Amino acid sequence: MSAVEVEGLTKRFGDFTAVDRVSLDVRVGEIFGFLGPNGAGKTTTIKMLTGLILPTAGRGTVAGHDIMTETDAIKSKIGYMSQLFSLYGDLTVEENIEFSSGLNGVPRSRRALRRDWVLEISGLAAHRTRLTRELPLGWKQRLALGCAVLHEPRLLFLDEPTSGVDPISRRGFWDLIASLAEDGTTVFVSTHYLEEAEYCHRLALMNRGRLIALDSPAGLRAGDHEPMIELAVDDPSRAAEALQASAVVLDAGMYGRLIHAAVRGIDEARTTLPGFLAERGVAVTGMREIEPSLEDVFVSLVRAEGGAAQ
Amino acid sequence: MTGTRFSLGRLLAVARKEVVQLRRDTRSLVLAFLLPVLLLILFGYAITWDVTDIATVVVDHDQSARSRELVDAFRSSRYFTVGRALSQTTEIAPLLDRGSAQLALVIPPRFGADLEAGRPAPLQAVVDGSDANTAGIVLNYTQGVVRTYDARVRLAGRTATPVVAVRSRVWYNEELRSRNMIVPGLVAVIMMIIAAMLTSLTIAREWERGTMEQLAATPVTRTEVVLGKLLPYLAIGLFDVAITSLLGVWLFQVPFRGDPALLTILTTAFIVGALGLGMFISAAVRSQLLATQVAMVLTFLPAFLLSGFMYAVDIMPRPLQAITYLVPARYFLVVTRGIFLKGVGIEVLRTQGLLMIAFGAIGLFLAIRVFRKEIR
């Protein structure tokens, strides 16, 4: 059985189509990554899946309940952590936990147990009586995650949970997500940090309201995409700029002292680029084809779809 | 949409959270607990429509036994405080200008002689008219003193009983003390302040801080949210009514002749309506600042100015009078004054009672209806 299964999910706001016929399914127990540039429609999709807004068109189920007619049932089955920090800053850590427990109907007998568990996984046991607004963002996000899983939902939606959080806190946060998944929770998580995509079992990429790819990280890397070439040059910044003018090069950027470029054809690039750069005063000292990173794959997929929304 | 069953647990969770937030919000605490007492003391002590101790100066051109008698008549009245004797009328204007005198009596040179001869003896009274109401009252009192003196002089030596004598008695507020009107009225006004200022913030705050989305993502229903938020404010409202009433009775000796239980029941209905209205505004405008301002204009000001608290409805211009019918505080004022001063029961206040309950129901309905749990 799928935790999430939707077809043709569409949301229009007036003339603007925020989400355009998205179909996807999320398997029970997997970490499902949801990626895409800002404005791609990720948050709107998540709001439809969590019963916060009704789709304009489409059908499907979340946690076995119809997204059109059973939003209340969905809300009681899932955990949701919104993009904006949405705990109460003027409540203490403990009071926020207690309030979430009450709202999500955690049985009275289990409340103390669940509270201690959340304090432990979020590492906030020593700060239980501090006002939430005084905590660093990374801690707040761990608390928000804890509050979202207080009622032990089998399906968890996290909307950009790590945005604005420092890398070390982000790593800790993903460890938490992984341990939840190990216990059998299905996690649907959106992010715009591409390195985080590697933590996911499967990835969906959205752009301009449409789903443009859906596969495992390895599958995406191995798929049909623009070849990448790595160039060693004596003047990387000059080379990167000059390459934008080349007809062979789709995109070029600096990676340390090296240049990575997406090109139309690998052989054509090998033969023309050294000369092209030499004419512009840059000497090429090395050249090899490389496996694209996930980021390269996504950038090329988005480019193939007409670029990101402005 | 499938209906979730009503859950008292969730309602209480909302109420508890609201209490914790209130406890940490100094501004709300001041509004809830300090402002009512402050208003009561301000209105009870400072603002009074009773006119006493009218600062009076006299220009006595006559200097006769009669003129001195007249001045003594003013002196012995508790409404007048007779100050300096002036020697000429030109001294009057600066005193009135500075406000150090409210009334100047000018006694013409032949006053005593005219009186003795039984001729009309005119007097001049100069009154500071910058406050029309007060000036009218001062003039009335002046005429009263003069008339009494006049009668005494004409009847001098004879004993005669007037043929017709009016003995008036004022009911409900024997001494015509304005405090007795103010304190019960203030109860109504304070309730509107609690509603307008306190609850207008409560839902807008959730929108502004982004916590509404988290609320919306849980199974909590809008009825549970509205009732849960209402509960603590209802408690504060009833507490304030009790404090204001007790202070009124103890500090200002306002009579309380009616049934406290009836007052409690009707007050509860009124507060629910007022709170509902505040939440309705808050949920409709979704901004704390705007909600406070709208609440001021829609609930607080009408309660203050158009309910009959500050100005009697009967003396308002017609169009304004028509508006007062839409001001719930107008009816609540009848309830509080009736129960405080007249000691009347539900048999007299039936209409007002029904209106209070209707107001409570409408306020609650509006709050729940406008409250959109769905994020747009």
Image: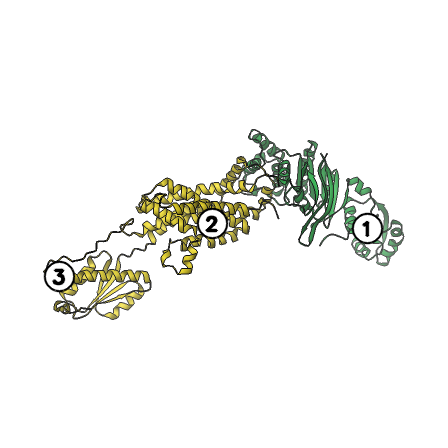
Chain colours: A green, B yellow
| Residue type for callout 3 | Leu
* Label 1 Cα neighbours within 10 Å, binned few <14 / some 14-19 / many ≥20: many
Q: Circle 2 marks a residue in which chain?
A: B
* Label 3 Cα neighbours within 10 Å, binned few <14 / some 14-19 / many ≥20: few
Residue B190 shows up from this direction: yes
Of residue B267 and residue A266, the one placed in the foreground of this image is B267
Q: Circle 1 marks a residue in which chain?
A: A
The residue identified by callout 1 is: A261
Both on one chain, marks 3 and 2?
A: yes
The residue identified by callout 2 is: B197
Q: In the image, what residue occupies the spot 49% across and 42% down? A: B230
Q: Is residue A304 left or right of residue A46?
A: right
Instruction: Determine the image quadrant of residue A170.
Output: top right
| Residue type for callout 1 | Ala
Q: Is residue B25 left or right of residue A188?
A: left
Looking at marks 3 and 2 on the same chain, the residue that comes earlier in the sequence is marked by 3
Cα separation, mark 3 vs mark 2, equals 63 Å
Of residue A126 and residue A213, the one placed in the foreground of this image is A213
Residue B155 is marked as 3
